[in-house]
Amino acid sequence: MAVANKWQAYQLHSQSDAIDINQHAPLVKKLASMMMARLPASVDINDLIQVGTIGLIEAARQFDSAQGVLFETFASQRIRGAMLDELRREDWLPRQARRNVRQIESAIHQLEQQLGRSPAEGEIADSLSLPLSDYQAMLAECKGLTLVHFEDFHDDEGNGSNQIANIVDGDAATPLDNLAEDHFRSALIDAIKLLPERDQLVMSLYYEQDLNLKEIGAVLGVSESRVSQLHSQAIARLRTRLRDWT
């Protein structure tokens, strides 16, 4: 992952003496750790931290306390933005992983229709004709799955219209705008309530309590990698229930 060179970082730092960069360095690590749950295993957290640090330095250079905004709030946006800009240059989820995602979602959907409830992990594995360990390994490969991504508008071979390119009017609603609609929020809340209790807890600890995977693992008494699997599975369940939106 490309990052700004040391000379550029030094130049930015020299222009931001009013803010102690080292004091706010833990914020970069915290945001990087939180973001890792939504990224594939190929992404190195140290790369995120490097890019996020450049974002922090840039935030310190541009920060204006007269605007009445806390530096932490301003810097968090810049740090996330720097990380996302760099990640957009890479493929977040390989094509095979996307196929695995569709297989898992299809199995969950069929089982929900048959059982009238959310299927257990073992039931999903059986439906896929996989040992539980292999199913969990598949979940690990699907790390980085999100509720909605632009690739949903393409088939496995990449065919189909490019929805981003089709947005001509700068004021037109984008997929991100649609996610903010009240109907989607209501549907999402209802879908979360139907998740198994453990999946609900994982989502709550991660998205509401801002705990990272390691911290959630400590709460649940499981490994960090196991939390990642549960997170991927919870997202797959939600995507299944929100098919009309995704």
Image (cartoon, helix red, strand yellow):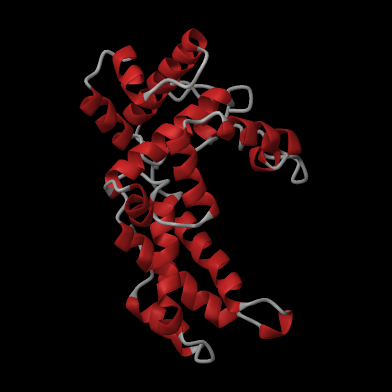
Q: Is residue 46 above or below residue 115?
A: below
- For image coordinates 45% across by 34% down, the residue present is 234
Front-most of residues 35 and 198 = 198
Is 77 displayed left or right of 93 in the figure?
Answer: right
Residue at image position (42%, 46%) is 38
Q: Quadrant of residue 11?
A: bottom left
Give the side of residue 245 with respect to residue 144, left or right: right
In this view of the protein, can residue 42 be seen by the observer? no
State which quarter of the image contains the C terminus: top right
Can residue 195 be seen here? The reply is yes
Q: Is the N terminus in the top left, top right, bottom left or bottom right quadrant?
A: bottom left
Total number of numbered discs in the rendering: 0
Q: Is residue 203 left or right of residue 68?
A: left
Rendering quarter of residue 214: bottom left
Q: Residue furthest top?
A: 114
Most foreground residue, 41 or 240: 240
The one nearer the camera, 220 or 228, is 220
Vertical placement of residue 62 versus 240, above or below: below
Query: Can you give x and y, in whole percent of width and height, for residue 84 in the image?
Result: 48, 55
Q: Position of residue 199 (x, y in %)?
A: 45, 37
Above or below: residue 183 compared with residue 111: below
Please say if 203 is above or below 187.
below
Residue at x 44%, y 19% (from the top left corner): 108
Q: Where is residue 122? Give x, y as percent.
A: 31, 21
